[in-house]
Image: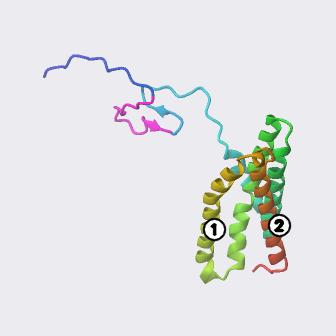
């Protein structure tokens, strides 16, 4: 049996990930933040996850629903989130605006489990799948159209007035008011 001479590997280019050459399961882990191979060292601190606070805040939804009901659990955090969104253009400095935006992001997702439970409670069992699909479709269309509308409002003096944020908050508050007026007297089964 003949042994091959050891040859040095060519230097790695930044951003170029070499394939993992180990046979141990789990030895090569690829993440969106870094590439962990036996040759690479992970960063000393993990990057902050902006979705962690909203995920933890969603845990309060069942407690709020048990105390106030599904409709209030849907509308109260959503209304607070829209009011925080309306306050962002009037923030005196960047730090305040960032805090308001993070608070808004934290509070804005509490209504998601309540909205799904409310839809299931209001819609007859045979139509729940269609109702959930239509709700997802409507939200998907709104999310895809909003950047185009915001971009057109970011030209000229409308950008200085915070028009996209104020319009988004006004639409959200209008949605909350319309939903409350339509369903405040509906008994949930």
Report x, y in % for residue 144: 60, 58
Q: Is residue 143 left or right of residue 26?
A: right
Q: Residue at x 60, y 68 (%)?
A: 137
Dividing the picture into quadrants, the one containing residue 71 is bottom right
Question: Is residue 58 inside the magenta stretch?
Answer: no
Q: Residue at x 39, y 24 (%)?
A: 12
Label 2: few (<14), some or many (≥20) within 10 Å? some
Element under disc 1:
helix
Q: Nearer the viewer, mark 2 or mark 1?
A: 1
- Which region shows up in magenta? 15-31
Give the colouring mode of the picture. rainbow
Report x, y in % for residue 167: 77, 57
Q: Quadrant of the C terminus?
A: bottom right
Res. 65 in view: no
Res. 135 in view: yes
Identify whether 6 is placed above or below 110: above
Report x, y in % for residue 43: 56, 27
Question: Is residue 28 inside the magenta stretch?
Answer: yes
Report x, y in % for residue 66: 81, 66
Please give the label number shown on residue 72.
Answer: 2
**Who is closer to the viewer here, 38 or 88?**
88
Q: Residue at x 42, y 28 (%)?
A: 38
Q: CA distance from mark 2 to mark 1?
A: 22 Å
Q: Is residue 14 left or right of residue 75?
A: left
Q: Is residue 6 left or right of residue 109?
A: left
Label 1: few (<14), some or many (≥20) within 10 Å? few
Please give the label number shown on residue 138.
Answer: 1
Identify whether 9 is placed above or below 160: above
Q: Is residue 127 left or right of residue 36?
A: right
Q: Residue at x 67, y 43 (%)?
A: 50
């Amino acid at each position: 049996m003949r042994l091959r001479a050891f040859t040095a590997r060519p230097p790695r280019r930044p951003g170029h990930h070499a394939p993992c050459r180990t046979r141990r399961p789990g030895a090569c882990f690829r993440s969106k933040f870094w590439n962990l191979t036996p040759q690479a060292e992970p960063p000393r601190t993990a990057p902050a996850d902006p979705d962690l606070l909203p995920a933890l805040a969603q845990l309060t939804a069942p407690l709020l629903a048990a105390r106030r009901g599904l409709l209030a659990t849907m509308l109260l955090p959503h209304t607070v989130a829209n009011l925080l969104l309306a306050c962002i253009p009037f923030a005196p400095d960047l730090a305040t605006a960032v805090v308001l935006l993070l608070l808004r992001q934290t509070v804005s997702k509490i209504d998601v489990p309540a909205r799904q439970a409310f839809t299931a409670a209001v819609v007859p069992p045979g139509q729940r799948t269609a109702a959930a699909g239509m709700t997802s479709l409507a939200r998907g269309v709104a999310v895809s159209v909003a950047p185009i509308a915001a971009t057109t409002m970011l030209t000229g003096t409308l950008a200085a007035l915070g028009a996209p944020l104020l319009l988004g908050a006004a639409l959200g508050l209008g949605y909350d008011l319309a939903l409350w007026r339509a369903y405040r007297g509906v008994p949930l089964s």
